[in-house]
Image: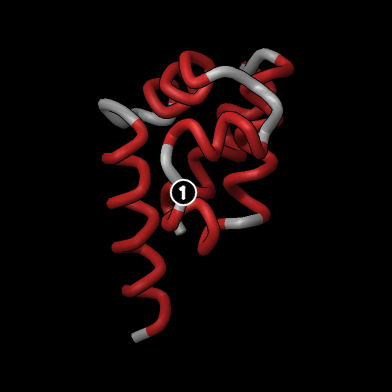
């Protein structure tokens, strides 16, 4: 999965709060697709702003685009 591999590639450059988001996203991909940005922030014990910054570091315009990329890649992987 390109997005997950991208997260692993930038992981060393992330701040600690962003690493918590990365850890949650990589471990709970299905769950992230059902969450709002606020729910992900709470699950990762960080702020909404940190989630948005993390998404931008992943090359996305925001959380919604990250979810779309993850969903597409998961669908491709299952077919």
Front one among 30 and 13: 30
Residue 76 percent coordinates (x, y): 32, 74
Look at 68% across and 27% down and name the residue there: 19
Look at 41% across and 75% down and name the residue there: 77
Callout 1 secondary element: loop
Look at 40% across and 68% down and name the residue there: 74
Q: How many marks?
A: 1
Q: Which residue is mark 1?
A: 35
Q: Is residue 69 above or below residue 43?
A: below
- Crowding at dot 1, Cα within 10 Å, few <14 / some 14-19 / many 20+, comes out as few
Look at 37% across and 22% down and name the residue there: 56
Answer left or right for 14 relative to 60: right
Q: Residue furthest bottom?
A: 79
Q: Quadrant of residue 27?
A: bottom right
Residue 13 percent coordinates (x, y): 63, 17
Front one among 8 and 75: 75
Residue 70 percent coordinates (x, y): 39, 55
């Amino acid at each position: 999965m390109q997005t997950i591999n991208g997260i692993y590639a930038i992981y060393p450059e992330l701040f600690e709060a962003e690493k918590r988001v990365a850890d949650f996203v990589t471990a709970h991909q299905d769950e992230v697709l059902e969450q709002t940005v606020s729910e992900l922030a709470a699950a990762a014990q960080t702020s909404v702003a940190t989630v948005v910054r993390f998404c931008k570091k992943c090359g996305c315009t925001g959380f919604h685009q990250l979810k779309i990329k993850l969903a597409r890649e998961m669908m491709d992987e299952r077919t």
